[in-house]
Amino acid sequence: MLIPYDQLEPDTLTRVIEDFVTREGTDNGDETPLEIRVERVRHALHKGTAVIVFDVGHQQCQLALRRDVPKEWLED
């Protein structure tokens, strides 16, 4: 299920993004400051190239590239 990023409280959205960009394996040696990485993700969400996916089975949110999400999820 997709969660429209603009329907989240700003603080909640920031925490979701920070959780994503600080996960082990997401930095790949990138020493870019956290604030810049958060803004990059926020920009991708705004442009529509990234989406927030809620995994019902695991009860958690994930960020994904729009191109990697099943097309039927995007039709709603």
Image: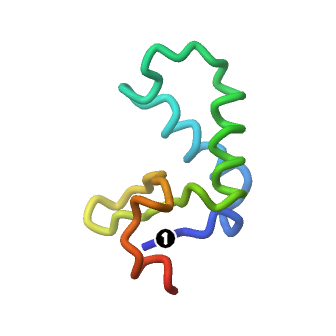
From the top left corner, tell me how far across and down residue 13 is, in percent. 64, 52
Work out whether 9 lies above or below 56.
above
Question: How many marks on residues?
Answer: 1
Q: Is residue 38 left or right of residue 22?
A: right
Q: Is residue 60 left or right of residue 22?
A: left
From the top left corner, tell me how far across and down residue 17 is, in percent. 58, 43
From the top left corner, tell me how far across and down residue 33 is, in percent. 66, 19
In percent of the image, x 53 and y 17: which residue is there?
30
* Along the viewing direction, whichever of 33 and 28 lies nearer the viewer: 28
At numbered mark 1, what does the secondary structure look like: helix, strand or loop? strand
Q: How crowded is mark 1: few (under 14 residues within 10 Å), some or many (20 or more)?
A: some
User: Colour mode?
Assistant: rainbow
In percent of the image, x 48 and y 54: which residue is there?
65
Work out whether 31 lies above or below 12.
above
Work out whether 10 lies above or below 40.
below
Q: Which residue is at the far left?
A: 57
* Along the viewing direction, whichever of 21 and 64 lies nearer the viewer: 64
**Quadrant location of the N terminus in the rendered image:** bottom left
Q: Is residue 72 left or right of residue 57?
A: right
From the top left corner, tell me how far across and down residue 19 is, in percent. 50, 38
In percent of the image, x 67 and y 38: which residue is there?
40
The residue at which mark 1 appears reads as: 2
**Residue type at mark 1?**
Leu
Q: Which residue is at the far front?
A: 67
Q: Which residue is at the far bottom?
A: 76
